[in-house]
Each structure stands twice: as structure tokens, then as C-alpha cells.
Amino acid sequence: MRYWLMKSEPSDVSIDDLARLPNQTVAWYGVRNYQARNFMRDLMQVDDRVLFYHSSCAQPGIAGLARVSSPAYPDATQFDPAHRYYDPRATSETPRWFNVDVQLLRKTRLMPLSELRACPELASLRILQRGNRLSITPVDAREYLFIETRLNEPGPTPDDATAARKSHDF
DNA sequence: GCCAACGTTGGC
DNA sequence: GCCAACGTTGGC
């Protein structure tokens, strides 16, 4: 079993949107980057685990846990001239883009990007490396398990900051 | 195959 | 809206 981090813009599909979809499942269409496509097409298997990440939003971070729930299949939007993800170079005989389905396991607390960056255990997480833009990246088992554990614990809150300031006053 | 121009991503 | 980083495109 492999582990992945998959970025989604909440204005497109948020964790709450996913929770409301039939079977809490979404087709991960629209990927138009070859490396990310290859991850889905060549490496992903049903039941791989997914960190569902909110990007391009006020509070970027991990918002839930999910699983790969289908093998990769041709992305339907590449064939639809009316769709923003239409690709005229693709034909049904030679599809260019693929996607898997992703099913929610559970919504978690939001683990913000700043918290991820603050964890030495996650220093090699792909998404934290400079210049990373890939919307799908592999995650080490150790990194995944560490994050899963942290998601079960309360995160830093404004109250913590207040308490820290107060204790500093003593 | 080189590489400049351009487009996209995504945190800030 | 800015800008750094990176992928893609297309002329040569």
C-alpha cells in the first residue's frame, strides 16, 4: 500500500464537498501534469491512502484522510470540447489523461501548512520542498503515520498562544 | 535538441 | 496582486 498527498482547492472540491458526494467519492479529473498523471496511472492502487490537502485558500493544510477507490481510467473531461479541461490532442483510442476515484475516510481537524513545516519529522515531505508545485505527491509510510497520529491530537490554537504569553509573564 | 517566452501554481 | 519556481510550447 502506498501513501499520497493530493491537493484540492476548497473552492473547487473541499473536504465538506467530498463528504456530501455520493459514496463520499470524487473522480480526480483535471490533472494535466504528466508526473502527477503517471502517479495515478502507473503507481496508484485501490486502497492506497490519501492525505486530502486544501490549497490556494486562506488556510492551506491537511483537511482529511481518504483512499484511492478505483484504478486509473481515462479522464472524461479531456474529450469534451465544452469543458475547461478539454484536450484536442486526446482521442478515445489514445487518451492522454487519466484519473482515479478518491473516497473520504474521515474529515480531520485542519493541520495547517505552518504546523507541517514546524515538524522535524516531516522535513523531507515533498510538499514542503522549495518550488514544489505538483498536485499529487508520494508520501512515505512514516510521514503518513506521523501525520495521522498528529491529526488525532489537538493542534495549536490561539488559546495556546495566549497561555504561552501568560506563562512567560511569570 | 536548445532555449526563450509564456502559462500555471500556490503561498504570502 | 506579487512573485518565485517550474512545466510546456514552439521557432530555429
Image: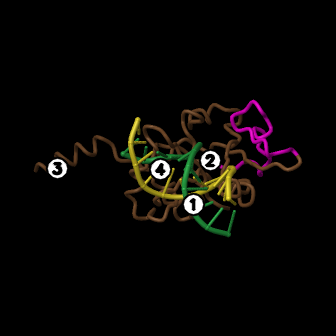
Chain colours: A brown, B green, C yellow
Q: Pinpoint residue C11: horizontal percent, then vertical percent.
A: 68, 53
Q: Pinpoint residue A133: horizontal percent, then vertical percent.
A: 54, 53
Q: Chain of mark 3?
A: A
Q: Chain of mark 1?
A: A
Magenta residues, start to end: A67-92
In front: mark 1 or mark 2?
1
User: Which numbered disc covers residue A151?
Assistant: 4
User: Which numbered disc covers residue A66?
Assistant: 2
Placement of A83 over or under A166, stated as above or below: above
Assess disc 4: are there few (<14), some (14-19) or many (≥20) residues with their C-alpha within 10 Å of its C-alpha. some
Q: Sequence-wise, which precedes: disc 4 or disc 1?
A: 1
Q: Amino acid at mark 4?
A: Leu
Residue under circle 1? A139
Q: Chain of mark 2?
A: A
Residue under circle 3? A167
Q: Sequence-wise, which precedes: disc 1 or disc 3?
A: 1
Q: Pinpoint residue A125: horizontal percent, then vertical percent.
A: 50, 61
